[in-house]
Amino acid sequence: MSGETADMNVAGMWVTADGYIRQELLADGRYDEARGDRRSAYTGRYTVTGAHLDYVDDTGFTATGDIRDGVLYHEHLVLYREESRPGA
C-alpha cells in the first residue's frame, strides 16, 4: 500500500453540539443538511479522500471538511456523529 490511507467511512448523521445543524452523509455519496426546522436546507454530493471531504451542493457551491479525532470540521462548523454528540 506504500503509504496510502484508506478512505474513512463517514456515512451517517453528523450534528452540531446544539443539534441545530444536522448533516446526513449517505453511503451513496449524497448528503442532506437540515438547519433548525428547515429540512433539506442544503443537498448535494460529497467525496472522501482519507479523512478529507469535498462537497458540491446542488447549486454548485463547494466546501470542504476534515475529520480529526472523530469530529467533522466542515468549514466553520464542528459536527459530531449523532450518537457521540456532547449532551446527547
Image (cartoon, rainbow, N blue to C red):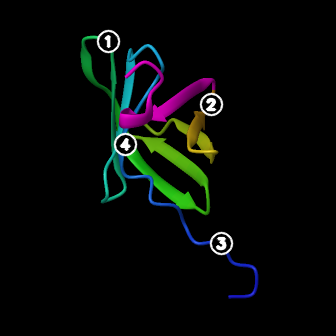
User: Residue 5 got which mark?
Assistant: 3
Q: Which residue is mark 4?
A: 44
The kind of residue tagged 1 is Gly
Task: Place residue 40 in its image quadrant.
Answer: top left
Sequence-wise, the earlier of marks 1 and 4 is: 1
Q: Secondary structure at mark 4?
A: strand
Region rendered in magenta: 76-88
- Position of residue 74 relative to residue 3, above or below, is above
Q: Tell me which residue sits at (59%, 62%) in the image.
A: 49
Along the polypeptide, which appears first: circle 1 or circle 3?
3
Residue nearest the viewer, comparing 31 with 1: 1
Residue 69 lies in quadrant = top right
Disc 1 to disc 3, how far (Cα)? 35 Å
Q: Position of residue 29 (x, y in %)?
A: 37, 56
Q: Residue 36's mark?
A: 1
Magenta residue check for 72 = no
Residue 35 % position (x, y): 35, 17
